[in-house]
Amino acid sequence: MSFEIWILIGIVLLFLIYLLSIYNRMIQLKNRVDNSWSQIDVQLQRRYDLIPNLIETVKKSMLHEHETLQMVVEARNAAQKASHEVFNSPSNSAAMAELTLQEEKLQGAINNFRIVAEAYPDLRSNTNLLSMQEELASTENKVGFARQGFNDAVMSYNIGIESFPNSIIANYCNLSQASMWEIESPEARKPVKVAFD
């Protein structure tokens, strides 16, 4: 074989190695998204496990608030189901949208529960309830930190598959954009009211 053929073979091999390195990088970024979601899933499961204990603690004191307690349980179950769907495919935008919706409903139900629980003086002094509420708040903070890590991983992945020439390989390999997980309660959009008495 002539020298020109060896040069051509070398160029083709270098190009293939280059394409493989791009593909491997995109897979690495996708795996980071999956791993970041597993960190969130651990915290969400912890929160989902706390909610029934919280309900059980207040059940006897809040006999007349059956509807409120039922709303929290139903919202928890729907959010947990949506979370399992995202766990199976963290880059699935439809599953992420459903989880966002269900988590917002759960947050609303928990906030409603807290408001109703404030009307019961014996609950305000219940150390078990206070401890569980503190643990729930701590878990919410951990979910927030894990969500930030997940969103950072999603951003890196999306940039990786949108950049040229990565986008060509991503299209060929059916790698699609992942959705960030952003939860924002309706209260977060309202302006803060400051009142001086």
Image (cartoon, rainbow, N blue to C red):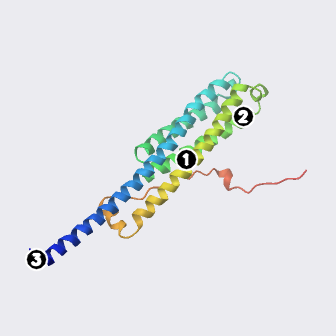
Q: Residue at x 56, y 44 (%)?
A: 103
- Marks 3 and 2, Cα distance to the nearest angstrom? 85 Å
What residue is pinned by disc 3? Answer: 2
What residue is pinned by disc 1? Answer: 146
Location of residue 85 in the rendering, given as x and y in whole percent from the top left corner: 43, 43
What residue is pinned by disc 2? Answer: 116
Q: Are marks 3 and 2 in contact (CB under 8 Å)?
A: no
Say what secondary structure mark 1 lies in.
helix
Location of residue 102 in the rendering, given as x and y in whole percent from the top left corner: 54, 44
Q: Amino acid at mark 2?
A: Val
Circle nearer the N terminus (1, 2): 2
Q: Quadrant of residue 1?
A: bottom left
Circle nearer the N terminus (3, 2): 3
Q: Is residue 181 visible?
A: no
Q: Amino acid at mark 3?
A: Ser
The numbered disc on residue 178 is: none
